[in-house]
Every structure is written in structure tokens, then in C-alpha cells.
Amino acid sequence: MKKLQRNFHSRADWLIPALFIALLGLIVFSLTLGRYPVPVADIVQVVLSTPLNAVFDYTDVHRVVVEIVRLPRILIVALCGMGLALSGAAMQGVFRNPLVGPEIAGVSAGASFGGVLAIMLSFSPVSTVAMAFAFGLSALVIAFCLAKLAGKSSTLALVLSGVVVGAFFSALTGLMQYVADPQTQLPSITYWLLGSFVGATYEKTAIVAGVMLFAGTLLLALRWRINLLSLGDTDAAALGVNIEMLRWVIVALVALIVAAQVSVSGGVGWVGLIIPHLARMLVGPEHTKLLPASAFLGGIYLLAMDDIARSAGNQEIPIGLLTAVVGAPIFAFLFWKMQGKGWARD
Amino acid sequence: MTEQVLSFENLGFAYKAGRWVLRGYKGAVKRGKVLAILGPNGRGKTTLLKLLIGTLAPGEGTIQTLGRVAFVPQLFQVSFPYTVLDMVLMGRARQVGFFSTPSGQDEKTALRALERLGLADLAARPFDELSGGQRQLVIFARTLATEADILILDEPTSALDLKNQGIILEWIERLSRQEGLTVAFTTHHPHHAYAVADSTLLMLGEDDFLCGPTQEVMTEQHLHSLYGVDLKRLQFEHKGRTVETFVPVYGRMDEVAR
């Protein structure tokens, strides 16, 4: 019996730490990428200088490139990738649906509108982030209220109200684009909506890190309970689970993460949809393993995409475009791989 | 030893005010005994079960339970191919803290539950690859892992073939007789109730029911008024024991009409 258990758990046992190490490795590698060449030794010294409180022998230009330009961006990308994939895995479990992504409650659309409105009103970058975050959370509250008004606490009611709220805010965003000044405002709105991590600062990093640390930790703590929710309402309730409260808590945590991500980088799709599927193929469907594996895999994926986005061409490619262009074929591949086996089989 | 561990009195419930699904229902089961609940589709069997497990609150009347109640739902598909052990572990939901995951002790309890039902070898298999009968037994194991005293089963033999129906019935008997668990189950098969239930509840109408020892309650006449179908009680010798069962008489509708 003991042996059986060990074999059974072993794959996830080494794979999850391996994914974490791979993510750390990719973070260091990403620091070496860019137009301005910086020797690896200098990168390591710059990164270590703050925690070790020591001054090493590197040029000031190297310090600025690594510490001010590259590091905050790489941290934000990794955190957003982790958050989106973690959220996607949680939502797919809660809604028992493979086509669900973290944006289901209309939060992405709300946050996008908030960001666009801020650009229209020529707000500062920090205010843009705040607006996106505020509108993302407003979208969630409206979706919650609509679902409550419908009188039912079913997942279907929440999905439908999320669709309504999402469509409403998308329409408002479209209206903003229509009335925006095509010379000055429209290009920056379009670029922001396509999604990009350009202009990452430590303030933005702090916002994302704070939210991810809070919401991500709680989501991870609830990962076993997501198994219970995925059984369906009657069964989960009979096992003593307060399904309605648990579902709202998880959706609210996911909304926080999505709002934080959209507010710093605009629309970045597909990560929360495909990464949980990939992770499920690696560690199985059980959420105590699936959530951490998804998080690390999501960080790796988005960081790799961002590395390509900023170094593949002469001009930076919007990462939202890249994740969609790459994500769609990956999803098609997964779909083909899972044919006849059930979508969620490992 | 023979105290009533599950009882309800003057039990009533309505989804919409004034439109009672059940009213005035009364029944009781003693420790280690089996209660079968029979009724046609839409009579409120599932509603009654939901009241007993506490996911619905009674509109009127009272339900008393001594000990923990666990629910075995109808055979279902899982959205994710969890392993058998993962499925059984979910029975520990009440014992595992809100922000934590099952402990080694929970895992031991789950494995012990699987062993009790002879399913230990299946622990690492995906739940959805099992046969219907095995899946139902795994859900039984999950119920044992809850360490409940009272099992409420919703049509445990539906969607199963004849052999698996027999296995499930045997387990219902064994869990009550040998493990001292109190069981209540709904069924559409009067002969299942007749085979294993100590007492039977016939849901004849919203405020019309019969509840008592199976032998007394289950008569041809009562079952006819329950289903509107003729049922015959048959008695015969099989492998040295006397078997009594009910068989519905179908067909020849033209004769019935005449």
C-alpha cells in the first residue's frame, strides 16, 4: 500500500520543484536578453548587490539596464503568468468546464475599460493602473449582484452575468475607441488593449506582487477544496462544503489577480486557458498538485513569450498578440491529443 | 443498541409556499437497520433525502439524527479523472481544515475505507475508468471515510447491471448488519427493498404514506396503489432457502383496457 502511494505521487513530487527551478532559471536567462549586451557576471552581481548590501565591480549603465529596465519587467511578467495560470486552473475546477478562463466574471473587460478611460482622460500611468483595477473589481461586484438578482446561486447564473457584464464593458471600450482622437489617443489605447509589459516599474511590480502574494497564497491554500467544488453542488454540499461561500471566495480572489494583471499589462489572453490543460497532462487533475504546477508553468510560458516579444523583431511585438497567436495552435494540439480520452485526462 | 438514530415527524416541505411536496410524513430507523423509500417519479423521494441529509430545511416538522449523516449520490460522472484515492479522500471534507489539505491520517482513513470494501488495489486508478458497480462502491468507501453513522443513498442500484445491483445490495446489507451503520435508500425496485430493507416507506401521495416493517407494508395491494401497476408476490425455493420477491406484471394492455 505504501509503495503504491509513493509511485502514484512521485511524478508531481519532483515535477513541481523542477518547474519552480526552471522558472528561476528562465528569470536569470531573461535578464541576459535585450538589445544592450550585459555580461552574465555583471547581471549576477547587480541582482545580488541589493540583498547582500554590497557594491561589486560593474558599470552604472549595466546596473540601470538590469535593475531598472529588465528586472521589474521580468518579475511582473513571471508574476502575471503565474497568477493567470493559477486563476485559470482554479476557475476550470470551480466551473467544471475546460473552456473557462480567469476572465469569466467580466473582470478583464471591466479592467480594460478602466484603463482605456484613464488613457482618454490623460491620467498618469499609476492612475491608469488604479482605474483598471477599480473597474475590474466593479465588474465583479456587478456580476455578483446580477447573479444574486437572478435568485440562484448556480454557476450558470454567474457565468451568464459575467457574459453580460463583459459584453457591456467591451461595448463601452469600443465606444471609447470610436470617440478617441485617432492621432493622439487611439494608438496608445490600441497598444494597451493588445497587451504589453513595456514600461514596467517597481511601483507596478509592487502592485502585482502584493495582489499575487495575497490572492495567490489564499487560492493555493484552498486548492484541495476546489476538488470538492468540482464534484457538483449536491454532492459537495452533502460532504459538508459551504459551496456558495467557497465559490464566491475563489471567484473574488481570481478577480483580484486578473484585475491586477490587466491593470499593469492590458489584455493578455490564453495563458489561463491553456496552461492548466498542459499542467493537467503533466501532474494529473488533482488540484493540490495542479495549482502549483499551473502557476510555475504559467510563469515560464509568459516569460518565454515576453522574451520573444521583446527580442524577436526590430520592434516589440504586443505580448497579447503573441500569446493568442501561439496559444490557439497549442490549444488545437491539446484538443487533438485529448480526443477520445476525455478533455481532462492526464 | 436499538435506539432510533434517524427519525422524522410531521415532516413537510414546499418549494413554493402552499404547494406541499410532502406533508405530515413520519418514520424512524433503528441503529443498524435499513429503511427503503419507494415512490413513483416526481413524488418527492429526492426531496425527502435532501431533507434527511440537511441540504434542504423542513417547512414544518422535525428530523432527528443521532450521529453523522453521509450521502451517497446517484451514480455520477466526474468532471476530472481523479484517482480513486482522491475521490475517497474527499469524504474527509469535514475533518480537513478550511485552508489545509488532507493529512497523512486522513489518507490512512481513506485507504482503510477502500480496504474494507476490498478496493485497495484500485486506489491509484482513475475513477472514471471503473465500471459502474466499482464506481458506486468507491462512493460507498468515500462515505465510510466520512466516519458517518447514517448512510443516505439515492437510488444506489440505478444505472447498474443485474450483477452489480446484487453486489450493491449485498454491501448495503453487510454495512448495516456487520458494521452497525444505519441506512436509508430510495429505489424504483420493490424487490430490492424486499430483499434488504427492515422497514419500508411507501410515498403514496403528498400527505399519504405508509411506513413500517417491510413484510407488513409491502403487499400487492399497497404496491398497486403506489405504482398503478399490478405486482405479484412470488415465493419459491432456491438453493435450499425460501425466497420471496415481487414481480411487476406488464404487457397485455389491451386486456387490461377491456
Image (tube, coloured by chain):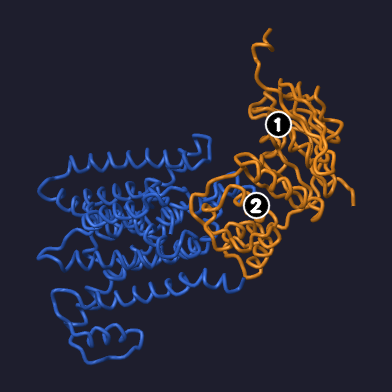
Tell me the CA gap for discs 1 and 2: 31 Å
Place of residue A165 in the rendered image (x, y in percent of width and height, measured from the top left): 37, 40
Q: Secondary structure at mark 1?
A: strand
Q: Tell me which corner region of the image, top left, top right, bottom left or bottom right, holds residue B205.
A: top right
Q: Residues within 10 Å of mark 1 (few under 14, many from 20)?
A: many
B241 in relation to A341, above or below = above
| Chain shaded blue | A
| Chain shaded orange | B
In-front residue for pair A127/A320? A320
Place of residue A213 in the rendered image (x, y in percent of width and height, measured from the top left): 43, 67
Image quadrant where one finds the C terminus of chain B = top right
Q: Residues within 10 Å of mark 2 (few under 14, many from 20)?
A: many
The image's mark for residue B13 is 1
Residue denoted by label 2: B137
Instruction: Tell me which residue sits at (18%, 50%) in the image.
Output: A190
Q: Is residue B192 visible?
A: yes
CB under 8 Å between discs 1 and 2: no
